[in-house]
Amino acid sequence: MTQHSMDEIYVSTDIEADGPIPGPHSMLSFASAAYTGDKQLIATFSANLDTLPGASPHPVQHAWWKTQPDAWAACRTDTRAPEEALPAYVDWVEALPGKPVFVAYPAGFDFTFMFWYMMRFAGRCPFSWSALDIKTLAFAMTGLPYRKTIKPKLPKHWFDAHPHTHVALDDAIEQGALFCNMLSELRVRQAAHVQWLARATNDGPAETTPLDPTAGPAKSETEPGQQGGGR
């Protein structure tokens, strides 16, 4: 097996639902955008789903969807049965040229639905039990309080000019680019930290480490972009 086939593939995933949890409520649509660590978008998968038998919309989400007619129309077009779409999705993930890592913002919401649907309709989850949460990564990189780690407070250069439309594929691509930009900056900081450790070992400790968020943002290899929205 080649080294490339062992690389991690970051599967940025967004779901749209008519309630807060699967089972009583339905996942209406989902999409994944598979990125390499150097921000190459190598594949996408998206599906609109039939609602679950016996499920019903939650009043809060039902009211919200009434404010999003374009996104609602997009997620109700060409719907597929979950028992057909989820096995096809799992096969797609397993065919990616690397180890798949589920990435979402916030992962707690999207992975809850995806894990439930994959186990219910495909019988397995190619991501194991794990999901990478972009919000938590941002919390660690910025030094903000966790509850204040929201997109409007994140560095603008982390965002590309992708739209946030509440159409699952659009949002999966948008947040995947955000994650890759953050990962690029994290790698720069990690390399600087290795150099800092070497200097500290030879010359005594420096005042701050490049991984200390209070020391200010490290220079990133990503291009400045437009700040995105969403949860």
Image: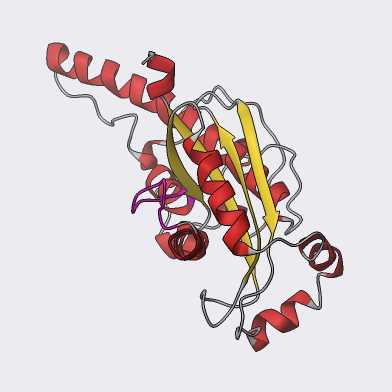
Q: Quadrant of the C terminus?
A: bottom right
Say whether residue 67 is left or right of residue 229: right
The image quarter containing residue 98 is top left
Q: Residue at x 61, y 76 (%)?
A: 52
Task: Choose between 138 and 22: the one closer to the eye.
Answer: 22
Q: Main secondary structure of the magenta part?
A: loop
Q: Is residue 205 above or below residue 65?
A: above
| Residue 117 visible in the current orientation | yes
Which colouring convention does the figure follow? Answer: secondary structure
Q: Position of residue 108 (x, y in %)?
A: 45, 62
| Residue 154 visible in the current orientation | no
Q: Is residue 55 above or below residue 71?
A: below
Q: Residue at x 49, y 46 (%)?
A: 103
The image quarter containing residue 215 is top left
Q: Is residue 64 above or below residue 32?
A: below
Which region of the structure is painted magenta? 123-134
Say whether residue 171 is left or right of residue 147: right
Q: Position of residue 152 (x, y in %)?
A: 62, 54
* Furthest residue in direction front, as rendered: 84
Q: Position of residue 2 (x, y in %)?
A: 39, 13
Task: Choose between 124 and 216: the one closer to the eye.
Answer: 124
131 within the magenta span: yes
Q: Position of residue 202 (x, y in %)?
A: 14, 11
Task: Choose between 90 and 213: the one closer to the eye.
Answer: 90
Task: Choose between 119 and 206: the one closer to the eye.
Answer: 119
Q: Quadrant of the N terminus?
A: top left
Q: Residue at x 35, y 20 (%)?
A: 192
227 within the magenta span: no
